[in-house]
Amino acid sequence: MEGKVNKVVLAYSGGLDTSVILHWLKERYGCEVVTFTANLGQGDEELEGLEEKALASGASKAYIVDLREEFLTEYAFPTMQAGAIYERLYLLGTSFARPVTAKHLVRIAELENADAVAHGCTGKGNDQVRFELTVKALNPFLKVIAPWREWDIRSREDALAYARAHNIPVPVTEKSIYSRDRNLWHISHEGGLLEDPWVEPAEDMFKITVAPEAAPNEPLYLVVDFERGVPVALDGQPMGPVELLTRLNELGGAHGVGRVDLVENRLVGMKSRGVYETPGGTILYTAHQGLESICLDRETLHYKELVAHRFAELVYYGLWFTPLREALSAFVAKTQERVTGSVRVKLYKGSCTVVGRKSPFSLYREDLATFGKDDVYDQSDAQGFINLFGLPLKVKALVDLENGRKAGLEMPDYTRFKRD
């Protein structure tokens, strides 16, 4: 099999693992290696000098593609519009980053006429599934090479020894005890001390949010404007998606918003603990839900909650490029046609709360909802509604009585409360 691979496109971060993989691919398969790096907003420090490093490590060509806007508009925002949250807490920042990365990995492979693609995901995680399902969906003829499922390297120490033996330049900075993934939407932390679910995360682990206790003592109010469910402005200032989320991350992070500590069920069958920082995403989810509360009718909103649960599973499982996800996205897009308006949120010591919402398509009518005097709602109409709505309950109770069964609760025995 090794001899049948002529060119591989490697999903490349420039860290220890992918640096070793680049050399290992050439040694094991005797092939040309092209690297591909997706800029999803992981930070300049992770991207600086990456092309030079890849070429110096033996790559024939190195692609670095800015996918930040596509990442937000075609993956993050549609997931947010769906209201998709995995296991009640996780806003899916890593999950929907993988399909956009793998999509362009396939595109570069086709552009380079490559035989295969490769990734550095381990055999224990979700990401191997997300990458490889995307490849299967978009180009089933490409071979996928996953070195962690093939080679004898089993630890960081093994990888460092391999790098030294082959003169591979690897990062010389101290290795964090945590495994992290960062993009414009969030940063995740796993491993290290977090592997004990009883241990509280250390404060120095967090990177983009301050501790709620250390956040300002005065709340911050923001107004987010949406058009058809898409955030388009902050405090009245129109912004593109990258600029807007970058600003929300700064403001939310400064107020301790968006921290989540979760023991989640991985797709591969095990439980794992992850700590996530998603300040801007948390603000958008909260504001969007606040706007939907006045723009969507009851039946649509309630059904959409069912869709949100399934949508989150599909994203988490790596099933983005599937007919069901596309069909659910079409439903969500239809629900967003009238989700236009403004939401005012309050950030205060780790919390993000909706304190105001307005929309030209609002279904909220103050003249109907008021507890004061009104001339548009006849309260006597409620009696007929209750009679019809409760008719099945009444019929069942009558049938129970006719068959000698008591309808409802037994009468309490008050005799024991008699005074002498």
Image (cartoon, rainbow, N blue to C red):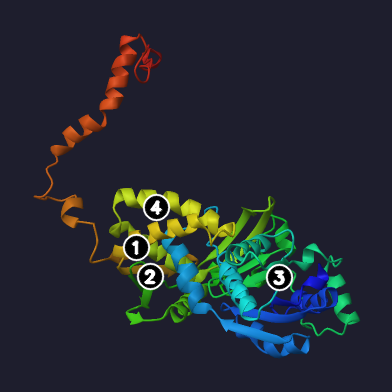
Residue in the picture at 72% in, 56% down: 196
Do the CB atoms of the residues marked 2 and 4 lie less than 8 Å apart? no
Do the CB atoms of the residues marked 2 and 1 lie less than 8 Å apart? yes
Question: What residue is pinned by disc 4?
Answer: 304
Which circle's residue, 2 or 1, is located before the other in the chain?
A: 2
Q: Amino acid at mark 3?
A: His
Residue in the picture at 64% in, 79% down: 37
- In the rendered image, which quarter contains the N terminus? bottom right
Q: Nearer the viewer, mark 3 or mark 1?
A: 3
Q: Amino acid at mark 4?
A: Lys
CA separation in Å, label 2 and label 1 = 9 Å
Which circle's residue, 3 or 1, is located before the other in the chain?
A: 3
Which circle's residue, 2 or 3, is located before the other in the chain?
A: 3
Q: Tag on residue 336?
A: 1
Question: What residue is pinned by disc 3?
Answer: 119
Q: Is residue 217 above or below residue 261?
A: below
Residue 202, image x, y percentages: 67, 66
Residue 24, image x, y percentages: 82, 75
Residue in the picture at 32% in, 48% down: 299
Q: Is residue 253 left or right of residue 13?
A: left
Q: Looking at the image, can residue 89 be seen?
A: no
Q: Is residue 336 left or right of residue 134?
A: left
Q: Is residue 100 left or right of residue 227?
A: right
Element marked by disc 3: loop
Q: Amino acid at mark 1?
A: Gln
CA separation in Å, label 2 and label 4 = 17 Å
Q: Residues within 10 Å of mark 2 (few under 14, many from 20)?
A: some
Q: Is residue 113 above or below residue 147?
A: below
